Amino acid sequence: MSQENEHVKCLIIGSGPAGYTAAIYASRADLKPVLYTGLLAGGQLTQTTEVENYPGYPDGIMGPAMMENFEQQARRLGTDIRFGYVSSVDFSSRPHKVVIDDSKTILADTVIISTGASAKWLGLESEQKYNGFGVSACAVCDGFFFRGQDVAIVGAGDTAAEEATYLAKLCRKVYMLVRRDEFRASKAMVHRVLNTHNIEVIYNSEAKEILGDGQVVTGVKIFNNKLHAEKILDVTGFFVAIGHHPNTEIFKGWIDMDENGYIITQPNSTRTNIEGVFACGDAQDHVYRQAVTAAGTGCMAAIDAERYLAAKEHAVTI
Ligand code: NDP
């Protein structure tokens, strides 16, 4: 296999709001960043429809168009944007070694990890068919489009409980599909769900098929595994809230993570346990998971990288 090495000051991995914001700041700080997009260039927002809660777009914007704007801004400011995925890393010495597409090794003085997270899906064919057309994995992003309508949400953890109560404020009725006869969510969250008048919890039930008219969602077929009975719920929105997984597998063994794989950063910074490696966006945030918060931590990561490099240079010259 041919090996080709390249030395860069700042390598950014991932192309969601965190990665592109880091790129914008790193470019303006003259770090000459190289950004590898990963396989899903533009990240999770390329899979949503309209984004109405990102500041600066008074009329809203489609997710893919917004990510093109991020990319163009980073490119105009000088970021070297490349399509490719990171296949392995070696953070045992500096500069850090990052292998791209199993073939090219980048030697990087600083690495900014912004690989994001992916929503878990049920795996139904109809779920993918109507993704963005009634099916969503983010109530905070998309709940607004279902104001006054009836929706269903699947999941029984804290995320599902939180999102169900969020949806209940906007929607007429929220059906909550719990696959066992009990919740996984904390007692306080369950209490809130059970005390919200327009949430109906349906236990022992799973979604079998999302129904639609070819364009948008019109219902969901559910199966009660205790009664062995099928039922159709008339809903226009179907929310999946069965968890997320951070895209951090390739950093395991090098970077400190919590039990769910989220990267641990030091308080009030994006520094990881490895000097010169910073993490931002959903790869290190399981609490907020918003485009605007990801962008904010991307900015922090670039500033942290710049200050780290400046301190190193200063130490060499004195
Ligand atoms: P969890 O892993 O805690 O819960 C996932 C839920 O989805 C479970 O109830 C599980 O059911 C259900 N589920 C999984 N697969 C399926 C399926 N195929 N069909 C139907 N249901 C399914 O994920 P969360 O995202 O809820 O939470 C992740 C972490 O973040 C947790 O530690 C949580 O406490 C934390 N969190 C905290 C919040 C807060 O404190 N405000 C808010 C949100 C999250 P089952 O129970 O049967 O396995």
Image (spheres, rainbow, N blue to C red):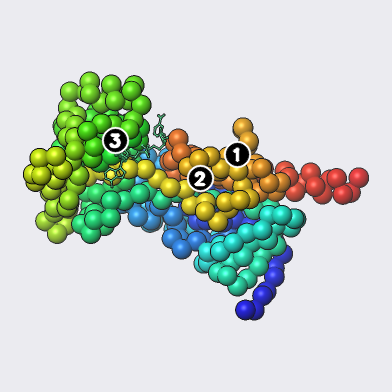
**Lateral position of residue 113 relative to residue 230, left or right:** right
Say few, some or many: other residues with alpha carbon within 10 Å of mark 3 (under 14 / 14 to 19 / 20 or more).
Answer: many
In the image, taking residue 205 as reference, residue 281 lies left or right, namely: right
Residue drawn 47% across and 48% down? 246
On screen, residue 3 above or below 269: below
Task: State the mark number for residue 156.
Answer: 3
Could you tell me which secondary element the residue under label 1 belongs to?
loop
Residue 265, numbered label: 1
In the image, 243 versus 205, the foreground residue is 205
Kind of element beneath mark 2: loop
Residue 261: image tag: 2
> Could you tell which of marks 2 and 3 lies nearer the N-terminus?
3
Could you say which quadrant of the image residue 191 lies in? Answer: top left
At horizontal 35% and vertical 49% (from top left) the residue drawn is 120
Mark 1 and mark 3: span between their CA atoms?
28 Å
**Residue 196, position as x, y percentages in the image:** 22, 23
Determine crowd level at label 2: few under 14, some 14-19, many 20+ residues with C-alpha closer than 10 A.
Answer: many
The amino acid marked with disc number 2 is: Gly
- Tell me: is circle 3 under 8 Å from ligand 1: yes
